[in-house]
Image: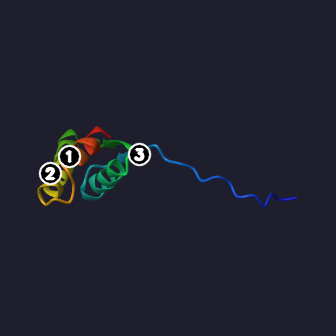
Amino acid sequence: AESTEAAAPAVAERAFVVGAGTMGRGIAQVCAEAGLQTLLFDADAANLARGHAAVLAAWDKLAARGKRTAEDVSRFAEN
């Protein structure tokens, strides 16, 4: 007999994003904004640095436009 009981949904707590290009850094950004502990990885250290800088710049831009607070940006960066 099969169970008809639905399984509880899994809850993600962490995200590991491989590739710090445009898509990877965007995924990492929204994961961090969602409160997930986020690790961005790229085999090329320079690409990783560019990706990280781009995420920080995007958050600063959102704060400057009033779409995020400085507290939001600080909290996102901790993730």
**Crowd band around label 1 with a 10 angstrom C-alpha radius: few (<14), some (14–19), many (20+):** some
User: What's under tag 1, amino acid-wise?
Assistant: Asn
Q: Nearer the viewer, residue 3 or 18?
A: 3
State the CA–CA distance, disc 1 to disc 2: 20 Å
Local packing at callout 2 (Cα closer than 10 Å; few below 14, some 14-19, many 20+) is some
Type of the residue with mark 2: Asp
Give the image location of residue 51, x and y in percent.
21, 48
Tell me the amino acid under the disc marked 3. Ala
Q: Which residue is drawn at 18% across and 54% down?
A: 58
Camera-nearest residue between 16 and 61? 61
Which mark is drawn over residue 47?
Answer: 1
Whether residues under marks 3 and 2 lie with C-beta atoms below 8 angstroms apart, the answer is no
- Disc 3 and disc 2: Cα gap in Å? 22 Å
Q: What residue is drawn where x is 28% and y is 45%?
A: 76
Query: Which residue is the site of mark 3?
Result: 15
The answer to whether marks 1 and 2 mark residues whose Cβ atoms lie closer than 8 Å is no
Q: Upstream in the sequence, badge 1 or badge 2?
A: 1
Question: In this rendering, which labeled residue sits more in front, label 3 or label 2?
Answer: 2
Residue 74 appears at what percent x and percent y? 23, 42
Q: Up-down: is 41 above or below 34?
A: above
Number of marks in the rendered image:
3
Q: What element carries label 2?
A: helix
**Vertical side of 24 occupied by 41: above or below:** above
Q: Which residue is drawn at 21% across and 55% down?
A: 68
Q: Residue furthest right?
A: 1
Give the labeled residue for mark 2: 60
**x and y, in percent, of residue 3 in the image:** 80, 57
Dot 3 or dot 2: first in sequence order is 3
Residue drawn at (20%, 46%), measured in percent from left and top?
A: 47
